[in-house]
Amino acid sequence: MTDMEAQRVSKFLSLVLRHKPDTLGITLNEQGWTDVDILLATLNQRGYRITREQLAYLVETNNKKRFAFSQDERQIRANQGHSVEVDLGYIEKQPPQFLYHGTATRFLELIRAEGLKKMNRHHVHLSADEQTAFTVGSRHGKPIILTIKAGEMAATGYIFYQSENGVWLTDAVPATYIIVENR
């Protein structure tokens, strides 16, 4: 599988496992898992020629660690970012003092007024480092990095989780906890 093919399959898997499992006619259980054999069979029926070994390679080498296998490797799921209803079993975790959110500058006025909202996802996604936030923000236009006063938020009762791939999650970030710096 070439890098280009791997990227194409990875993007399609993200769509299917996070947002539209019905695209392949598969179902996700309450925790977001689906059967690997059924997934592979339906992918192959749709022209995505992929073996179990290639799927394992995608899971292991995805730079964002978007996917995970169950312990017995019979099931697969996306680690976070779902718009479909799933319970990933996150455990509350104390965040560092500051986290970061990358976005496009065109959204800044709305964010200053309303804060960060989860929109069509289950959580607001935050990064532990500025470089990851910059990369995320770059996908949407001219990037800007927002510094989130996560420690202060947690101290006032906001709950944080950390997904298996290191992404920090919370329900919302009010504007008062957002620092906008010109970099």
Image (cartoon, grey):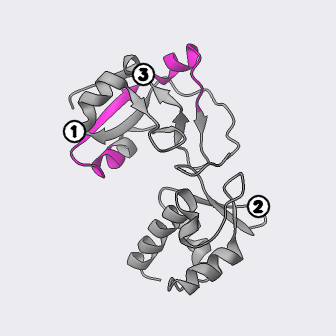
Q: In the drawing, does residue 109 fall left or right of residue 119? A: left
Amino acid carrying mark 3 in the image: Pro
Residue underneath mark 2: 71
Which residue is at 59% across, 17% downward? 157
Residue stretch in magenta: 134-160
Which residue is at 79% across, 66% downward? 72
In the image, is residue 152 part of the stretch drawn in magenta?
yes
**Discs 2, 3 touching: Cβ within 8 Å:** no
Closer mark to the observer between disc 2 and disc 1:
1
> Quarter holding the C terminus?
top left
Mark 2–mark 1 distance (CA, rounded to whole Å): 42 Å
Query: Where in the figure is residue 155, as x and y percent of width and height?
Result: 57, 14
Label 2 environment density (alpha carbons within 10 Å; few <14, some 14–19, many ≥20): few
Residue underneath mark 3: 174
Closer mark to the observer between disc 2 and disc 3:
3
Residue at the far top: name it. Answer: 156
Residue underneath mark 1: 106
Seen in the picture, residue 166 relative to 12 is either above or below; the reply is above
Query: Where in the figure is residue 21, as x and y percent of width and height?
Result: 58, 64
Q: Nearer the viewer, residue 18 or 132?
A: 18
Amino acid carrying mark 1 in the image: Arg
Mark 3–mark 1 distance (CA, rounded to whole Å): 18 Å
Q: Nearer the viewer, residue 96 or 77?
A: 77
Tag 2 secondary structure: loop
Which residue is at 48% across, 56% downward? 64
Tag 1 secondary structure: helix
Amino acid carrying mark 2 in the image: Gln
Is residue 19 at all visible to an observer of this figure? yes
Q: Quadrant of residue 170?
A: top right
Q: Quadrant of residue 38?
A: bottom right
